[in-house]
Image: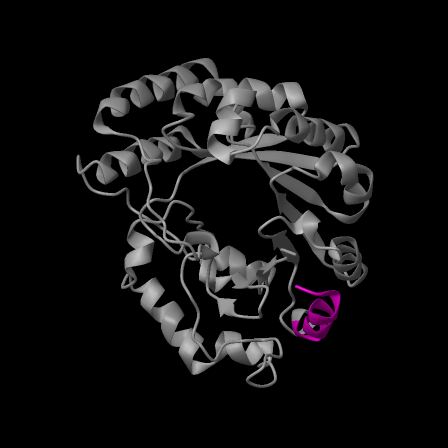
């Protein structure tokens, strides 16, 4: 995603009364124009949110806190060995340094944990680590092994990351422990999910093991948000591809489509109707659903929250 491309989208953001732009990736901080993109969005009255692996956050913390309203860092281990086993590199201390630096500078800094077989036993330790690092909150989701295209995967995805049947009792014990020992953290919102939603993660892994149904999914995210990929491809969410013609940036095949037109055109409207009717198989196994009360959406006139991939 380039600064020029983002600048071309600004009139559409105004027309749609967009409130928040999420810069995701890949790793947004590897994009050489990340600061200019964030500054431009912010200068146009938008709140800007960074979703990062945190590898370069310590280096850029002082600049990032000036440009982003909030930062969320993916952290998948509570020690160097677990982090390296999952991420494939020895960077645990560097990521923790970045979280600590951003939090110390006063910006709202959250931690997002993708639970999987290599780290589910550390569930309660993640909460303790988040407090130690000064994070504002911590959230958990299950590793997505049911959707091979989640979060724009392009490789052949074969997973051994999910819990096995013999892991389920241990995960149940971990959930019991965190519910008992961290009641106040649930009440305060420091743990973003409710105990019930954390139980859905257990149910998800049980379904992967064919021990029961997938947890019910209630989501209307495509009604108030959309994803613009680095190539300009428009999607209703991270998990479902958009119509081929819904490209809002210029490409080799021609100019980009007007964003409001693409969002509210026939193809995207029909796709959202399929999602709303529960006809998309991706939704049945989604690990990252989001629901907002339709009356609240209408009352706040919250037209869109765009996740713009900002990978280099």
In this picture, is 60 found above or below 155? above
Give the number of callouts: 0
Query: What percent of the width, then of the height, locates residue 92?
Result: 60, 26
In this picture, is 219 found above or below 122? below
Tell me what residue is drawn at x 35 percent, y 50 percent: 218
Tell me what residue is drawn at x 25 percent, y 29 percent: 164
Tell me what residue is drawn at x 29 percent, y 52 percent: 284
- Is residue 288 toward the left or the right of residue 229 in the image? left
Q: Residue furthest left?
A: 211
| Prevailing SS of the magenta stretch | helix
Q: Quadrant of residue 7?
A: bottom right
Q: Is residue 144 magenta?
A: no
Q: Quadrant of the C terminus?
A: bottom right
**Residue 95 in view here:** yes
Per the rendered image, the range of residues in magenta is: 1-12
Query: What percent of the width, then of the height, locates residue 19?
Result: 66, 59
């Amino acid at each position: 995603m380039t600064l020029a491309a983002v600048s071309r989208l600004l009139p559409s953001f105004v027309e749609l009364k967009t409130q928040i732009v999420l810069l995701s990736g890949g790793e947004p901080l590897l994009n050489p124009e990340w600061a200019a993109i964030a500054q431009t969005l912010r200068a146009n009255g938008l709140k800007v949110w960074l979703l990062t692996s945190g590898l370069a956050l310590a280096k850029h913390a002082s600049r990032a806190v000036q440009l982003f309203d909030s930062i969320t860092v993916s952290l998948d281990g509570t020690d160097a060995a677990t982090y390296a086993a999952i991420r494939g590199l020895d960077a645990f201390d560097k990521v923790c340094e970045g979280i600590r630096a951003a939090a110390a500078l006063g910006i709202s800094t959250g931690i997002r944990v993708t639970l999987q077989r290599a780290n589910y036993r550390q569930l309660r330790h993640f909460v303790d680590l988040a407090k130690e690092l000064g994070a504002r909150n911590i959230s958990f989701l299950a590793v997505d092994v049911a959707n091979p295209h989640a979060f724009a995967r392009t490789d052949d995805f074969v997973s051994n990351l999910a819990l096995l049947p013999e892991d389920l009792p241990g995960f149940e014990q971990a959930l019991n422990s965190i519910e008992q020992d961290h009641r106040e953290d649930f009440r305060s919102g420091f743990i973003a999910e409710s105990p019930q939603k954390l139980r859905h993660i257990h149910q998800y892994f049980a379904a992967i093991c064919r021990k029961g149904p997938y947890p019910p999914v209630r989501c209307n995210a495509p009604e108030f948000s959309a994803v613009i990929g680095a190539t300009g491809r428009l999607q209703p969410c991270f998990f479902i591809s958009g119509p081929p013609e819904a490209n809002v940036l210029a490409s080799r095949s021609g100019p980009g489509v007007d964003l409001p037109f693409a969002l509210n055109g026939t193809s995207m409207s029909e796709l959202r109707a399929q999602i709303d009717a529960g006809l998309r198989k991706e939704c049945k196994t989604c690990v990252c659903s989001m629901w907002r009360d339709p009356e609240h959406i209408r009352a706040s006139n919250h037209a869109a929250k765009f996740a713009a991939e900002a990978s280099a």
